[in-house]
Image: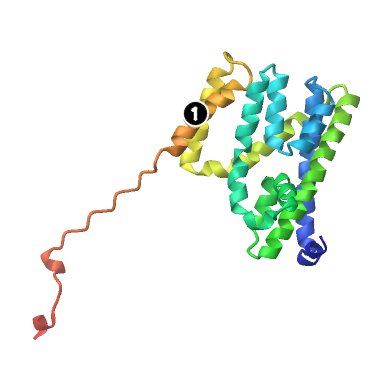
């Protein structure tokens, strides 16, 4: 920990603090939304400590609150967390070994990986990863706990707009990826399937079905443009030799 303080500067700590503050605010929305949905107060706090994955937890709670099956909620949460597999492959040098790997793997999240990959120096990459990871490990459960308290004290916490915080964050994170045409087509296909099947299927199942066309379109090999045919050589463009200028 002492080496982290020596490696990072004030600007780095300010960036990490801003990230943790944003995570805490989303955690408040998560805790309040869970209470508003009628779920027990201990559930968001327990999930925030053991799972520590905002997207998966929001989807799990939303599916269960909507009356969906527990199996569907778990499967959707696991599918969302599949992104941690490439995360682990991208930062193997900062997670650590032995018992540190257990903590480092649990602290792996979108924010800590993004800040780590933005650094080229190995020491700074490790310091950013661990500092942000530990910060999120504290901010997310604390935010969820505050949200639970707000949800229990305020009759309708949604009037403060807390229910819109997480969808807005997800949309903001997804917009840059939608600039890619293939990603945009896959997302559109999944959205159409989910919207069409929502009135007929239990909560959670439309999300699972939406992954099928999205994955198929995303895996379609990209067609490379055909190289332009070379222009025919005419008499006006014949190579000139030295003998032509005698």
Categorize mark 1 by other alpha carbons within 10 Å: few (<14), some (14-19), many (20+): some
Residue at the farthest top position: 200
Which residue shows up at 76% across the image and 42% down it? 23
**Element under disc 1:** helix
On screen, residue 12 versus residue 113, left or right, reads: right
The residue pinned by badge 1 equals 212
State which quarter of the image contains the C terminus.
bottom left
Q: Can residue 185 be seen in this snapshot? A: yes
Which residue shows up at 71% across the image and 32% down it? 57
Q: Can residue 158 be seen in this snapshot? A: no
- Percent of width and height locating residue 33: 78, 27
Which residue shows up at 63% across the image and 63% down it? 120
Q: Quadrant of residue 125?
A: bottom right
Q: Quadrant of residue 69?
A: top right
Q: Quadrant of residue 48?
A: top right
Along the viewing direction, whichever of 75 and 39 lies nearer the viewer? 75
On screen, residue 143 versus residue 221, left or right, reads: right
Look at the image and name its color scheme: rainbow
Q: Is residue 45 above or below residue 117?
A: above
């Amino acid at each position: 920990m002492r080496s982290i303080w020596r490696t990072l500067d004030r600007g780095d700590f300010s960036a990490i603090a801003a990230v943790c503050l944003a995570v805490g605010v989303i955690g408040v929305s998560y805790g309040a939304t869970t209470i508003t949905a009628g779920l027990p107060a201990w559930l968001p706090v327990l999930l925030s400590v053991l799972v520590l994955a905002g997207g998966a937890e929001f989807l799990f709670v939303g599916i269960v609150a909507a009356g969906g099956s527990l199996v569907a909620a778990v499967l959707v949460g696991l599918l969302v967390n599949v992104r941690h597999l490439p995360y682990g492959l991208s930062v193997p040098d900062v997670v650590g070994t032995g018992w540190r790997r257990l903590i480092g793997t649990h602290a792996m999240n979108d924010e800590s990986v993004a800040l780590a990959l933005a650094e080229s120096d190995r020491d700074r990459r490790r310091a950013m990863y661990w500092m942000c990871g530990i910060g999120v490990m504290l901010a997310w459960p604390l935010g969820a706990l505050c949200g639970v308290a707000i949800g229990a004290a305020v009759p309708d916490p949604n009037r403060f707009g807390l229910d819109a915080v997480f969808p807005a964050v997800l949309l903001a994170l997804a917009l840059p990826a939608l600039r890619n045409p293939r990603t945009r087509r896959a997302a559109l296909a999944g959205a159409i399937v989910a919207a069409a099947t929502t009135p007929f299927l239990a909560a959670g199942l439309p999300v699972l079905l939406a992954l099928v066309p999205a994955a198929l379109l995303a895996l379609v090999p990209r067609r490379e443009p055909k190289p332009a045919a070379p222009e025919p050589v005419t008499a006006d463009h014949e190579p000139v030799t030295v003998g032509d200028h005698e």
